[in-house]
Amino acid sequence: MHYIITEEQRKRLVKGWKIIDNKLKKTFEFQSYKDVLKFVEKVGSIAEKQNHHPDMFVKYNSVEVSLFDHEAGKISNKCHKLASLIDKI
């Protein structure tokens, strides 16, 4: 696997984030579609501020977030930072 985050950063990832296909992924579940949309909007706002944009797969009551640094071609510190910020929502 390709990492440019440190092993310590990998260990500190909040529960639920997994490395799958060289991307950081986590699924968030909600009570309603309205809650899903609010979450996606908040993630989008954070992503714009960080200039690092995740892929998001939206279902009725869940969102799968996938982080990958396209510029670096790997999981980077940007991914780790964004994952941490998303978990604070």
Image: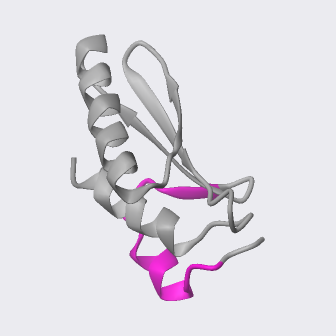
Number of numbered callouts drawn: 0
Residue at x-position 64% and y-position 79%: 4
Residue pushed farthest right?
1
Locate residue 33: give its quadrant. Answer: top left
| Residue nearest the observer in this picture, 31 or 53 | 53
Q: Does 10 lie within the magenta span?
A: yes
Percent from the top left, x then y, of residue 37?
A: 30, 21
Percent from the top left, x then y, of residue 47?
A: 39, 48
Percent from the top left, x then y, of residue 75?
A: 63, 66
59 vs 38: above or below? above
86 vs 3: above or below? above
Residue at x-position 24% and y-position 25%: 38
Instruction: Specify the color scheme.
Output: one colour
Left or right of 54? Residue 20 is right
Q: Does 60 lie within the magenta span?
A: no
Position of the N terminus, as image quadrant, is bottom right
Query: Magenta part of the protein: which range?
Result: 4-19
Residue at x-position 74% and y-position 64%: 73
Left or right of 9? Residue 22 is right
Left or right of 5? Residue 30 is left
Percent from the top left, x then y, of residue 24?
A: 57, 56
1 vs 20: above or below? below
Locate residue 55: give its quadrant. Answer: top right
Residue at x-position 41% and y-position 25%: 62
| Residue nearest the observer in this picture, 82 or 50 | 50
